[in-house]
Image (spheres, coloured by chain):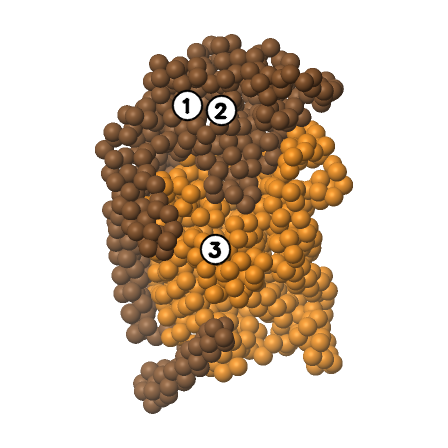
Amino acid sequence: MTSLLIFLVLAFIGIAVWQLTKIFDLTQVGTSKDNSEVANDHDNKVNGYLMFAFVGFIYLFTIYSLVAWGDLVLGTPASAHGSEVDNLMNISMALIFFVQTITQFLLHYFTHKYSGREGQKALYFADNNKLEAIWTIIPVIVLSGLILYGLYTWNDIMFYDEEEDVMYVEVYAKQFSWEARYAGEDNTLGKANVRYIEGVNTLGVDMEDPAANDDKAVTGELHIPLGKKVVFKFRSQDVLHSAYMPHFRAQMNCVPGMVTQFAFVPTVTTAEMRLDDKIIEKVNKINKIRAAKSLKLVAEGKEALDPYTFDYLLLCNKICGASHYNMQMKVVVDTPEDFKKWLAEKPTVTKVWKDANAPAPVEVKEVTPSQVVDSTVVVAQVIK
Amino acid sequence: MSAHEHGHHKETFITKYIFSIDHKMIAKQYLITGMLMGIIGVMMSIFFRMQIAWPEESFEIFKIFLGEDYAPGGVMRNDIYLALVTIHGTIMVFFVLTAGLSGTFSNLLIPLQIGARDMASGFMNMLSYWMFFVSCIIMIASLFVESGPASAGWTIYPPLSALPQAIPGSGTGMTLWLVSMAIFIASSLMGSLNYVVTVINLRTKGMTMTRLPLTIWAFFVTAIIGIVSFPVLFSAALLLIFDRSFGTSFFLSDIFISGEVLHYQGGSPVLFEHLFWFLGHPEVYIVILPAMGLVSEIMASSSRKPIFGYRAMIASIIAIAFLSTIVWGHHMFISGMNPFLGSVFTFTTLLIAIPSAVKAFNWITTLWKGNLQLNTAMLFSIGFVSTFITGGLTGIILGDSTLDINVHDTYFVIAHFHLVMGISALYGFFAGVYHWYPKMFGRMLNKTLGYVHFWVTVVCAYGVFFPMHFIGMAGLPRRYYTNSAFPLFDELADVNVLITIFAIVGATFQIVFFWNFFYSMFYGKKATQNPWRSNTLEWTTPVEHIHGNWPGEIPEVHRWPYDYSKPGHEDDFVPQTVPMMEGEEELHH
C-alpha cells in the first residue's frame, strides 16, 4: 500500500513538473526572450554571478566545516612518531588549502568577470611557454620538498634499528576479534601457525618451541608500556584485517599466511591522555550524546547506554566480513611498573595449555616440517 | 574502410535500434544503459547511507527493495550493507563511469571528429556494446541469488572474496560478479582496440594528429591505457576463479576458518592486491581522462577562445597515462609489502600531481579574457575543474605514505575518490550530455531545467562529500555497517545524518535531469546544425543521422579546432573545414 502511495506521489510530481514546464514555456511566447535553448546575455550574467557566489559558498562551507568539525580530527598523538606525522599533515594541509583558495577564486571569478556579452570579443591567447614553465616548475619544487620530508618520516617509522631495545608483541586477527601474545622474558615469540590451533591454543602456538614457554596470550585488553618501542607482529587467521590504532598513528594490514609488522613508542599513558583538555572536551560531548540517546532507549523499554571513558583503541580497518564494524580491542598504555604488574598476573601459554590438557594423554597431531612456516620471520623485511 | 550505402540500406527496427553497427546508435545505447545502471548504483548508495545515518532502523523502502531476506523486518542485514557498497562501487566505476562515459562519447565523437564514416569495425563495435549489456544483466542477476551478491568490497580482496564461509556473498554472488566482469573487460578491450585503430587509420585528409580535438587525444590515450591494464584484472579474476573453484593457492595460504584448517598453502593476498591495482589505478584515469577531453572541448567552444596550451595539454595527457601505470602501490602502503616499495610509489604518485596541475591551470587560463557562453554544459565543465582541483589536492595527502597510515581506508579516502570520480568525472559526463545532446538526438535540452539541475547538484554534491574529510580524519573506517559500536564515533553521528540528507536530496533531484533528457528527446526544440557555433567536424554533419555521417564526400580539414575569436576573421569561430586565408598563419601543423 505504501509503495503504491509512493509511486503515485512520484508520478504526480512528475506530471506537475511536466505541466509547469509547459506553462513556463507558454509564458515565454511573445516575449522578446529567445527560445533557442542556447544561453543568451541574461543567462550568462545570472550564472556568472551565481558562479561567483558559489566560490563564496565553497569558502563559507569550508570555514563552517573547520569550525564545526575541526575538533573531530584526532588530537594529541600518543606515539613518538605521531608528532612527525601530524607535522607533515599540517604542512600538507596548509599547502593544499592555499592552492585551493587561490585556484577556486580565480576559476569562479573569471567565470563571472568574463561572462558572455553581445559584442564582447575574446582574446586569442593560445599558449605561453613561460607560463607553462612557471606552473610546472613551481609544483615540482614544492612537491619534491613534500616528498623528501614524507619519505624521511616514512623511513623513520617503518625501519627500526635491530640493536634497539624493543618489545615484541604479536597481535592476532580473526573474524571478529583480536588476541595478543607477549614474548615474555626471552623477548622471542614462539613459532606459530594456524595448523597448531587446537582447543585453548587459539593462536596456534607451537608448544614444542622453547621460545613459546614464557609467551602470554591475552584477549580483551592490550597493554603496552610507556616509553618502550613496541614492535607489533601481526598475523591473521582467516581473511585480511587491518590493525588500526588511530591515536598512535599506526595501521598495518593483517595478512593470512604472512607476518607483517609495525613499531612505535607510546608516549602518553591512558591516565595522562584522560587528563588532556581536548580529550576531556570530547568525552563530555560524547557522554552528552549518549545520555540523550539513553533517555530515548529507556523510554522504549531498552537498556541505557554505558557512559564513555576515554580509552585507546585497536579497530579493524580492512573489510573482513559481516561484523567488520565491531572488531575492537582496548589498548592501554601503562607506566612501566604498572605494565609489569599487569603482565605478571597473566598465565603463560604453556600453563594454559597444560591446565586444559591435564591429566589424560592427548594425541599429538603430527605436523610435517614442510607444513610449518616460521611465522615469526617478517616477510615485510627490515632493510638496513 | 567501411563504406555504407546510404539510401539503399533496408533497415528494420532490429537493425536500426537493436543490433546496429552505426557508431552513433551504439553511443546512445551505451549512454542509456549507463544511465540506467547509474540509477541502480545511486539507489544502493542512498540505502546504505540511510543505514549509516539511522543505524539499525526499520525502513519501509528496505522492505520493498531489499525484501525480507536481505532486510528482515525492514532492518538491513549487516553483510547486505557490505553487498550494497560492493555492487555500488562496481557499478559506478565500471558500468557508469567507464562504459557509460568512454563508451558513449568515444563512440559518438571519434568517427565524427576525425572525419570517418564509422569505426574501423562496426561489427566489433556492436559486439562490444552487447557484451557490455550482457555483463550488466549478469551483475544485476547476482543481486537476486539466495546467498547474496558479492560483498567483499568492489576491490574484492581474497581471502574474503574467495571463501563463501567468510561471508555469504562470496558464494554464487561472487562467481556471477567475476563472470560479469570478465565479459565487461572483453567488451571494454574490444571497444578500446576499435578506438585506437580508428584514430590511427581513419582520419580524414588534413587531419594530422596535432589538428585533433583534445577529446580525441583523451579517448585515444584512454583506450591505450585500457588495453595495457584491463587484461591484468582479467588475469587476477581468472586466478581468483582458480582459487575458488579448482583448489589452487595463488592468493591463499594458512587459513583457519569455520573450525578447520583449509588446504591452501603458499599463496599471498598481497599478490592479488598488486594485480588488482595494476588495473585499479589506471582505471581511475580511464574514468577521468575522457571527462577531461570533453571539458577541454566544451570550455574552448564556450569561451570562444582556443584551449590554452594545446600542446601542453596533449603532453599532460600522455604523462598522466604513463605515470598512471607506475603508481598503483599507493593503494597498498600498509598492505604489508616492503616499505621500500612504499617510498617508490610515494615518489611516482606525487609526480602525477604535476601534469594534473598543469591541466587545471590551463583550464583556468582558458577562461581568462574569454567571452564565456554559460550554457549548462559550460557550467558543468567549470564545476569539473573546481571539484577536480579539490579532490586532486587531497590526493597529495593520500599519496604520501606517511600520511596514508592514519587515513587509509577511512572516510577521507571516500571523500577523495568521490570528489574526483563521483563528482568531477560525473560532471564531465553531464557536460558531455548537455553539449552533444543536439548531435545525438537532433533536439535541444531545456535550458532552464539544465540550470536548475546544475545548481542543486553542485550544492548537494559538496554537502555530501566535503564533510567526509573530517570524519575520516577523526578515524572513522569505511565499510562499517554502523558506527554505534564505538562510543568514540558518537560525535560523528550528526555529520553522517547531514551527509545522508544532502545525498537523498541530491539523488532525488537527478529526476530533473532524467525528465529533461527523455522529454526533450521527443518534444525538445529541434536543433540547428551547429547550435554552439563550434569548429569541430561533428557539427558539419546533418542533424538527421545518416549512416556514413556525411551525405557526400568527407570534408577536408585545413586547420586545428581552436580558431575561436581569431584575429582577421569576422566570425568568432572558424570551422576546421575552412581553408587558410591568404597569408594566414597556423599555430600548429
Name the chain letter of the residue that bears numbered label 1.
Answer: A
Image quadrant for the N terminus of chain B? Answer: bottom right
Marker disc for residue B48: 3
Q: Is residue A87 left or right of residue B39?
A: left
Amino acid at the residue labelled 2:
Val
Name the chain letter of the residue that bears numbered label 3.
Answer: B
CA neighbours of label 3 inside 10 A, class few (<14), some (14 to 19), many (20+) = many
The reply to whether callout 2 and callout 1 are in contact (CB within 8 Å) is: yes
Which residue occupies the extreme front position in the image?
A359
State which tag comes first along the sequence, 2 or 1.
2
**Which residue is painted at 34% across and 85% down in the image?**
A28
Amino acid at the residue labelled 1:
His
**Which residue is painted at 25% across and 35% down in the image?**
A280
Residue B412 percent coordinates (x, y): 41, 44
The reply to whether residue B344 is in sight is no
**Which residue is painted at 61% across and 54% down in the image?**
B149
Instruction: Tell me: residue A172, above or below residue A52.
Output: above
Q: Is residue B498 left or right of residue B270?
A: left
User: In terms of secondary structure, where does tag 3 sit?
Assistant: helix
- Look at discs 2 and 1 and give the one toward the viewer: 2
Chain B shade: orange
Residue A171 percent coordinates (x, y): 51, 26
Q: Mark 2 = which residue?
A: A218
Q: Residues under labels 3 and 1: Cα distance? A: 36 Å
Name the chain letter of the residue that bears numbered label 2.
Answer: A
The chain letter of the brown chain reads A
Q: Mark 1 = which residue?
A: A223
Q: Residues under labels 2 and 1: Cα distance? A: 9 Å
